[in-house]
Image: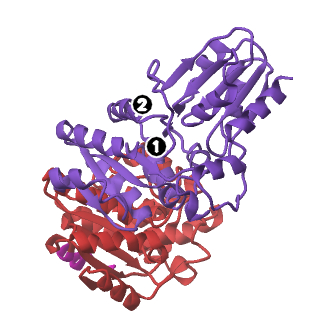
Amino acid sequence: MSLAELRRKIVRAAFVAGEGHIPSAFSILEIVQALYSGGMEPEDRFVLSKGHGCLALYAVLADKGVIDWRDFESYASLGHPDAARIPGVEFSTGSLGHGLALGAGLALGKFINGEPGRVFVLVGDGECQEGATWEAAGVIGELWLNVIVIVDGNGSHLDNEMLKAQFASHGIPRQALEGHRPAELVKAFKEVRGPFAYICKTVKGHGSETFEDDPEAWHHRTPKPDELEAILGEIR
Amino acid sequence: MRKQFFATLHRLMADDKRIVLLLGGVGAWAARDIQRDYPGRCYDLGLREQAIIGMAAGMAKAGLLPVVYGIAPFFVERAFEQIKVDIGYNRMKVILVSVGASFDYAKSGATHHCPGDIATLYQVPGLRLVVPGTARELDELFIQAIEDDASCYFRLSEQVNEKMHSVLDGNGCALIGNSPFSSLIIAVGPALEWTLKAIGNMAVTVLYFQAIKPFDFDLVYRYLNGNKIFLVEPYYPVLAQEIMQAARKPVQVRSLGVPREFLGIYGTIEEQQAAAGLSPENIRREYLEFCK
């Protein structure tokens, strides 16, 4: 399914559920799709720390056949990810700043068990204001854990250059990446070994002018019936 | 009790390869034997309490059984949301072990005191709470906790009861004395010793709880004869509501515990305890007043 079609699915699901963070999901859609389209190996694990972007994850999981499209809208109505109810979701997240430590623990656990595989953790730039994120980053850098941090650097809260410096100061090699170029993302994810941080330059609401123009107004708002068709029509 | 914890854990780690010990900048010396014998399963992750709880949940997801050890206020209160969400809501089995509560770091002041750990953690659905009264009880209850499916918080105390009481029915509740005529006294963990000193040779029924969550409602119901229940808890009290529910009839409950205030005391544990109104003398006075 094309990215535009996935975006329309996300908007429809949020509309039906009356719940969702559409611009945040659009910000990370290419990243999540790249992870599940060759970026990750079967033994790798993915933690969506910025739980409010979950509609992007559900859309990709449905596109890959992990969940049923018929369940997609009902999952949207659950708000933030509930790992006990939704297949393919590693952890229930939503409260920001928790995911990097969860991913670090998963990676350390895999190491202790002698299991192969990397752990990818997608965090928002706002989460990088949380102290818990940097506590986890410190452990990842010190123990050289096989964790790849992907920052959705859409500029909502922090500057990407500063983020690069912060990861470097925690002993984690880092690199800037364009967050809406699927082929580049797949290549980068495929080759990397943790610890590593990709600071992805993204646009909140990417793929819809309405959301891109006023992402904060749409942060936690779903379309009204008279807005739906226009938004679906403009999605690219 | 702290020494017993590390000895018990060391023994269990020999057979249960899932167990991993996580420290947060404290306890490295006490854990030196574990570190020596199981270096790949003992990590001091530094003063990062929030990340340690999150990592423990992540390691549980990988199939391990993390045991987190630390000073009560610094991980129970600082990392409460991680305990609630990463362990509780995500249903990851982790064992939490604290020292220092309520006033075991008595002279260190209120930053190091933690009479609120039990009241705080009572809010986490599915988390078991255990307040052992002796080192041997801790050993017995810890083995149970490793075998159980649920996450569990152990509150280790400097003050211990003189006599060990065995665990009844897996609920961690022991019964002392049995008088059909008097009011019922309930004491938790090390508060048992203070309570027994307080009542002296009075013929009363005392229920002793080591495990307080899940609460054994039936035990209270079975031993309740009158309509008065006197409760002694060594922390900010939490059980009055459970006890009223357990009674299944209107009862009068007098709940004694650490008052919810900064005591401003910098003395010994016993002095803190007395300032909190939990000296045997005061417990006796309160009990006799209650029985009038």
Residue B287 in sight from this viewpoint: yes
Q: Is residue A182 magenta?
A: yes
B152 or B288, nearer to the observer: B288
For this orientation, the residue located farthest to the bottom is A161
Q: Position of residue A203 (x, y in %)?
A: 43, 81
- For the N terminus of chain A, give its image quadrant: bottom left
**Residue on which disc 1 sits:** B153
For badge 2, the amino acid type reads Glu
- Which chain is tinted purple? B
From the viewer's side, name the closer residue of B137 and A76: B137
Chain letter for mark 2, please: B
Helix, strand or loop at mark 2: helix
Would residue A90 be found to the left or right of residue B277 on screen? Answer: left
Find residue B183 and report its horizontal and vertical position in percent. 74, 18
Q: Residue furthest top?
A: B180
Q: Is residue A43 visible in this depiction of the protein?
A: no
Outermost residue to the right: B292
On screen, residue A177 above or below B292: below
In the depicted view, which residue is nearer to us: A161 or A223?
A: A161
Which mark, by number, is residue B137? Answer: 2
- In the rendered view, does A228 fall on the left or right side of B205? left
Q: Disc 1 residue type?
A: Tyr
Q: Quadrant of residue B142?
A: top left
Considering the numbered disc 1 on the image, is that residue within a helix, a strand or a loop?
strand
User: Rounded to the nearest whole Å, what is the CA distance between mark 2 and mark 1?
Assistant: 14 Å
What residue is shown at x 47% (from left), y 70% (from top)? A24
Determine which quarter of the picture holds residue A145. Answer: bottom left
Span highlighted in magenta in the image = A178-188
Residue found at x 57% / y 71%: A219
Give whichever of discs 2 and 1 has the lower sequence position: 2
Q: Colour of chain A?
A: red
